[in-house]
Image (cartoon, grey):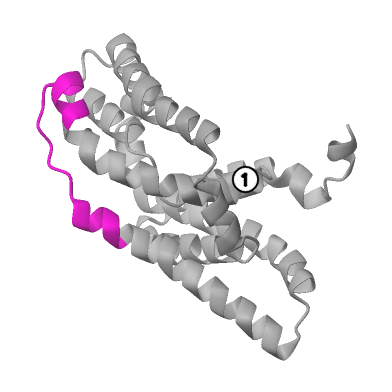
């Protein structure tokens, strides 16, 4: 109860704002499909900025210490790479047996730990972002090593893993924001800028950038959703 009383108005209505962003994106896709094609770069830029803002609130020392936390690391690996693949296959078996390609897509989606998004939602939930960054190294290594195995045994298909694309995404959405955040902290120290005051202000910016990202995602892919309503319903 004490933690709930400390929530600001923006925190309380944030779920509604994110849902509204989805609706806004779908409306753009429905009534202005030509314009929606130009929104895809907003996703890349927006995710980069949000992760950069998140990195401002954590330290390299905290990330290094998180690598030594064996219990949560082991638990996360077991969930991501043992429980989730089996669960993904089971969901597909129950709902998507008549749509084998969609079934394969579901497995591929659920057994591929995301690179940047979970850091965003971990931070929104006031979770341990430093541990999340440390887990990313394990996620990427095991993803590259195990994804072909999962697809062969669970879906009966051999799908090559684009390791270069994964590493490129890490560079854009993790390493670059982390380096930029460290340079920003050095600037704060040199110029004696109040970092805490800046951090409190950007909390509002993070929410609205995230809203723009979500709206752009659904707007740019909305035509696919509208053309396959039955498949969308099954996935939901």
Q: Residue furthest bottom?
A: 191
Residue 82 percent coordinates (x, y): 35, 22
Q: Quadrant of the C terminus?
A: top left
Q: Residues within 10 Å of mark 1 (few under 14, many from 20)?
A: some
Start and end of the magenta stretch?
A: 149-168
90 in magenta? no
Q: Quadrant of the N terminus?
A: top right
Q: Nearer the viewer, residue 206 or 87?
A: 87
Determine if residue 27 is in view. Answer: no
Residue name at image x 37 percent, y 42 percent: 139
Q: Is residue 147 left or right of residue 180?
A: left
Task: Classify mark 1: helix, strand or loop.
Answer: loop
Q: Nearer the viewer, residue 165 or 70?
A: 70
Residue name at image x 11 percent, y 21 percent: 156
Picture quarter containing residue 174?
bottom left
Residue 140 percent coordinates (x, y): 33, 46
Residue 5 percent coordinates (x, y): 89, 40
Q: Is residue 108 left or right of residue 152?
A: right
Residue under label 1 = 128
Determine if residue 83 is in view. Answer: yes
Residue name at image x 39 percent, y 20 percent: 83
Looking at the magenta stretch, what is its main secondary structure? Answer: helix
166 in magenta? yes
Q: Nearer the viewer, residue 132 or 51?
A: 132
């Amino acid at each position: 109860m004490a933690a709930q009383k400390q929530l600001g108005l923006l925190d309380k209505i944030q779920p509604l704002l994110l849902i509204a962003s989805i609706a806004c994106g779908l409306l753009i896709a429905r009534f202005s499909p030509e314009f929606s094609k130009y929104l895809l770069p907003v996703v890349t830029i927006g995710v980069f900025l949000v992760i950069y803002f998140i990195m401002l609130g954590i330290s390299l020392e905290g990330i290094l210490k998180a690598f030594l936390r064996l219990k949560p690391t082991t638990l996360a690996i077991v969930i991501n790479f043992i429980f989730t693949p089996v669960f993904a296959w089971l969901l597909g078996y129950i709902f998507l047996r008549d749509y084998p390609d969609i079934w394969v897509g579901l497995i591929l989606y659920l057994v591929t730990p995301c690179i940047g998004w979970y850091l965003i939602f971990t931070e929104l939930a006031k979770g341990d972002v430093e541990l999340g960054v440390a887990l990313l190294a394990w996620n990427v290594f095991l993803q590259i090593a195990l994804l072909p195995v999962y697809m062969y045994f669970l879906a009966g298909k051999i799908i090559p893993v684009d390791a270069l694309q994964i590493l490129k995404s890490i560079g854009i959405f993790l390493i670059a924001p982390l380096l930029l955040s460290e340079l920003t902290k050095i600037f704060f120290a040199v110029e004696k800028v109040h970092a805490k005051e800046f951090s409190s202000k950007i909390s509002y910016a993070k929410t609205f950038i995230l809203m723009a990202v979500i709206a752009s995602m659904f707007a740019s892919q909305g035509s696919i959703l509208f053309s396959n309503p039955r498949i969308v319903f099954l996935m939901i």
